[in-house]
Amino acid sequence: MNTMRFLIAATLLVGASALSLTPENYDSAVAGKTVFIKYQAALVRALQVHEAAWDSLMDEYKDHSSILIADVDCTAAGKPLCDAAGVKGYPTLKHGDPASMEDYKGGRDEKALKEFAKSMKPSCSPANIELCDDEKKAEITRLQAMPVVALDALIEEKEKLLEDSEKNFKAAVEKLQASYEKLQKDKEDTANQVKESGLGLIKAVKAMKASGKSEL
């Protein structure tokens, strides 16, 4: 018990020295950078196997000019960031441009995390427009010329498409589930009907005939 308390305290102490993102420091911390962020629950953090690997990675990149590796505590001040990122479980790792992060699907041991971090590079974005091709530059320029109200409307439109897609997916899964349950019930009903109709008795009579035993 004391050993477990020591491990939790030690892990929390290491994590406390790393950058923890909150709504107050998020914008300034991610500005102009490619990010690799872990959304987590601090109390669960201490019990997770690969925390030392993540802490080592954060320490290695803590002063990097174009890459940010950081934590967000979804059970404390960072909760609004977790909600905005659509985090459903802990830990969730996301990476890329802060405005359009993607889920990280690689390994979580130290070697895998470090190899992935090495592959991270600044990408085309409004903050790094010099990295964009002409087509993307034109698109960014067009969007920058739009009022915030119009941008909000575009965002709402795109997010609604995602929400509708999710609703349609869930509805289709529910229909499949209902169809599966009906098919399962039909199968069981048929099996019971066949059993009750004398299949077992028929097989027993056939077996007796095959054995050459006398009939009644």
Image (cartoon, helix red, strand yellow):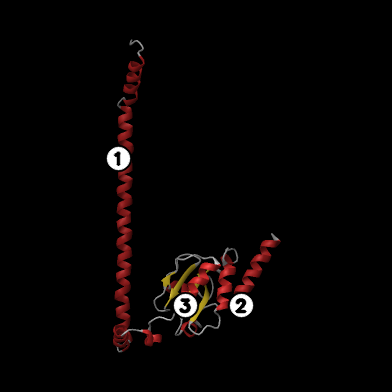
Amino acid type, residue under disc 2 in the picture: Ser
Question: Which mark is nearer the camera, 2 or 3?
Answer: 3
**Residue 7 falls left or right of residue 34:** right
Name the residue at 30% across, 44% down.
Answer: 182
Name the residue at 43% across, 74% down.
Answer: 84
Name the residue at 32% across, 76% down.
Answer: 156
Question: Which mark is nearer the camera, 1 or 2?
Answer: 2
Q: Quadrant of residue 186?
A: top left
CA separation in Å, label 1 and label 2: 61 Å
- Which circle marks residue 2 in the picture? none
| Quadrant in the picture for the N terminus | bottom right
Amino acid type, residue under disc 3 in the picture: Val
Residue 80 appears anywhere in the view: no
| Horizontal and vertical percent position of residue 210 | 34, 17
Question: Which mark is nearer the camera, 1 or 3?
Answer: 3
| Horizontal and vertical percent position of residue 40 | 52, 69
Identify the residue position indicated by label 2 in the image.
17
Residue 168 appears anywhere in the view: yes
Mark 2 falls on what kind of element? loop
Identify the residue position indicated by label 1 in the image.
186
Q: Residues within 10 Å of mark 3 (few under 14, many from 20)?
A: many
Query: Which mark is first along the chain, 3 or 2?
Result: 2
CA separation in Å, label 1 and label 3: 53 Å
CA separation in Å, label 2 and label 3: 18 Å
Nearest the camera: 86 or 214? 214
Mark 1 falls on what kind of element? helix
